[in-house]
Amino acid sequence: MTDRKAQLAANLAKVEARIAAACVAAGREREEVTLIVVTKTYPASDVRMLSGLGVRHVAENRDQDAAPKAAECADLPLTWHFVGQLQTNKVRSVVGYADLVQSVDRSKLVEALSKEAVRAGREVGCLLQVALDAGASGRGERGGVAPGKIEELADLVAGAPGLRLDGLMTVAPLTGEYAGRQRAAFERLMDLSTDLRRAHPAANMVSAGMSADLEEAVAAGATHVRVGTAVLGVRPRLG
């Protein structure tokens, strides 16, 4: 085993232990929580090693990095998640490899995703990114739709050809009433998920929690956690 693979294996084991302990503390089964490893800024060689270590879900947030990496790893049994803010001019490329887009937050993006999914003959899973810090503009600092706009956007996704409404995603906000209150933020997301599932029962995915706050997300009921640094190490500088 190479030094890098050994490092990744050790880090992955620590994260697995954290998720398992969080599940025990929350009275949940380990199988209820899926680990998504966020591989942004790291090379395809790391993705290949992670796949060999049993990782099945990976996430990227920049199409210019993700597209070539996904192509290089096309032979691996991986589910690719796109988690970054997505501009409509990148949609065609992203639909080419992403199985799920976790950052759906506006009608224009839904229309673009639907058009490209149909063109590519694919079904793309969509999570609505919820902005718990949404201000007067109705959007959050890091994208996302205000809680009050979820129902309207969900109906749009559910009715769009080529798209599948899978659930909700959030990033713990840095400003507003939930700043520094990750558990409360994730519990609010779970309440919003409950509301969503009344109209869309299959949209039961809840993506929340990262390296620093995955325990709070598991405690709140998240079905998926997105972990980067804790598995791959401190990110190299971009540029």
Image (tube, grey):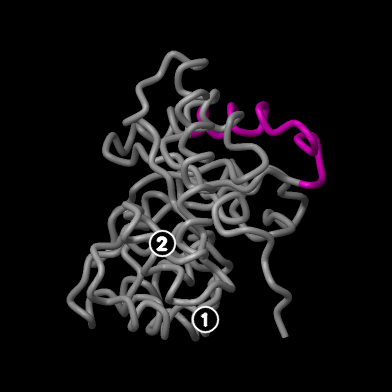
Q: Is residue 183 magenta?
A: yes
**Residue at image mark 1:** 65
* Residue 186, horizontal then vertical, whole percent: 60, 32
Which residue shows up at 55% across the image and 72% down it? 42
* Residue 93, horizontal then vertical, whole percent: 39, 84
* Residue 7, horizontal then vertical, whole percent: 53, 56
Q: Give the position of the C terminus as an image quadrant.
A: bottom right
Which residue shows up at 53% across the image and 32% down it? 18
Q: CA distance from mark 2 to mark 1?
A: 13 Å
Looking at the image, which is closer to me, 46 or 208?
46
Compared to 151, does 27 lie above or below?
Answer: above
Please state which amino acid type lies under the numbered disc 1.
Answer: Asp
Is 217 displayed left or right of 198 in the figure?
right
The residue segment tinted magenta is 174-192
Looking at the image, which is closer to me, 94 or 163?
94
* Mark 2 closeness class: few <14, some 14–19, many ≥20 residues within 10 Å: many
Q: Is residue 186 magenta?
A: yes
Compared to 68, does 210 lie above or below?
Answer: above
Please state which amino acid type lies under the numbered disc 2.
Answer: His
Q: Give the position of the N terminus as an image quadrant.
A: bottom left
Depth-wise, is mark 2 or mark 1 nearer the camera?
A: 1
The disc, 2 or 1, on the residue closer to the chain's N-terminal end is: 1
Mark 1 lies on a secondary structure that is helix
Is 28 displayed left or right of 169 in the figure?
left
Q: Dividing the picture into quarters, in which one does residue 220 lie?
A: top right
Q: Dividing the picture into quarters, in which one does residue 183 lie?
A: top right
* Residue 198, horizontal then vertical, whole percent: 35, 29
Task: Please tell me the numbered disc located at residue 207.
Answer: none
**Residue at image mark 2:** 81
* Mark 1 closeness class: few <14, some 14–19, many ≥20 residues within 10 Å: some
